[in-house]
Image (tube, rainbow, N blue to C red):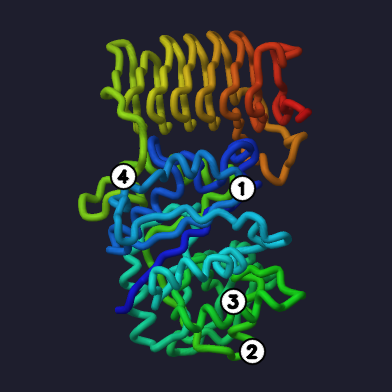
Amino acid sequence: MGNVVAMILAGGQGTRLGVLTEKIAKPAVPFGGKYRLIDFTLSNCVNSGIYRVGVLTQYKPHVLAKHIGIGKPWDLDRKDGGVQILPPYIGRGDSDWYKGTANAVYQNLEYLEENDAEIVLILSGDHVYAMNYNDLIEYHLLKKADGTIACMEVPMEEASRFGIMITDLDGKIVDFQEKPERPKSNLASLGIYVFNYEFLKEVLVEDEHDPNSSHDFGKDVIPRIVNEKKGNLYAFRFEGYWRDVGTIRSYWESNLELVLPLPPFNLYDPNWRFFTHSEEMPPAYIAPEARVVMSLVSEGSEVYGFVSNSVIFQGVRIGKGSVIKNSIIMTKTEIGENCHIENAIIAENVRIGDGTRIGVGEDARSKLDPKVYTGLLTVVGMNSIIPGGVVIGKNCVIGVGITPEDFKSKEIPSGDFLIKQEE
């Protein structure tokens, strides 16, 4: 098969996730009760027997770097290979920051050469999926391709959100459209690529010296290869579970899919385990007066109220008489007594006072950013403290680090927001 090296693109800002990514990179966003988004890509690598992994970071990388550490939870703390964090180089003038996904890999060609890469697997660190990369690589070798792109069919009305492939009968890509207004097909790129190293190096060097390029795989490199017929690119059709949780709505929906009796994404498969770095906590406690219906409750949590159709992360405390419905409550958040929270995403380390109501009333268009905050969901940023008795409507936003002193009123109407202005 040749020596395989994986490069995980983990520098994304994730602006469509709003306050959830204000202080952390998108791949570090918590998911599924105890994981972070990058855990799924890292776990796919080790489950596929790939132990040479570079993680390319950029935007607010501290939480992500601390989470990955030396890679021990994923068995990537190895003397030969293992995981390595690859931030942008320091002291190279205009090249200090990665200019795009292609430039990020270009800046780390030396890392690939040091690891004797023959086949390079380029992955995104912010998608939720389970994939055996060996299937993709074997297809790539069978086709004698220069590069192969993992794809899946998506609804035609969603095709304009993706890079779209047009293939011949043999699976060779003959046309590529990056987020087209009028897509020619519904075969969408998953942002998962495999390249022969020498071919990849050649196209990246050429792209780097193109002054008109934005140095992005989807926008520049892939179209150039296809349109100028620089190599043979093939499409590998993936039929498993894959989700881009890049919006508030898709993030909420993907989490709540996990509580279904037969979830489309299986966290419990003993043959394909997902690993993470998390704090050791005691078992979850469900009090005699509590009731939990169709929900995930992670270790360290204490539930004294009613929880329905929700994902409760580690170390969460839900007080007596409180009702949680259709919501995501992240790590170490404390909810007081007699609260009502519905259709909400509450980030890490939030404190909610007694009698607070969140996600109530009629829907309203977001006054902050209607493109980001939509669909009845109220979002509370990390490290915020909400005083008791406050009523927060639907489609509201409470920013990061909000304190009781920031509340000028006991009511935040639907569609409104409370954000600290940066000094």
Question: Does residue 10 lie above or below 260 as drawn?
Answer: below
Question: How far is the residue under mark 2 from the one under mark 3?
Answer: 14 Å
SS category of the residue bearing label 2: loop
Q: Earlier in the sequence, mark 4 or mark 1?
A: 1
Residue lying at 44% horizontally and 74% vertically, measured from the top left: 194
Q: Earlier in the sequence, mark 3 or mark 4?
A: 4
Q: Which residue is mark 2?
A: 228
Residue 385: x and y in percent read 59, 17
Residue where numbered disc 1 is placed: 59
Near mark 3 (Cα within 10 A), the count class, few <14, some 14-19 or many ≥20, is many
> CA gap, disc 2 to disc 4?
43 Å
Image quadrant occupied by the C terminus: top right
Q: Residues within 10 Å of mark 2 (few under 14, many from 20)?
A: few
Check contact, mark 2 vs mark 4: CB within 8 A: no
Q: How many marks?
A: 4
Q: Quadrant of the N terminus?
A: bottom left
- Identify the residue position indicated by label 4 in the image: 73
Query: Mark 3 highlights which residue?
Result: 204
Discs 2/4, front: 4
Nearer the observer, 419 or 9: 9
Mark 4 near mark 1, Cβ–Cβ under 8 Å? no
Of pointers 2 and 3, the one earlier in the residue sequence: 3
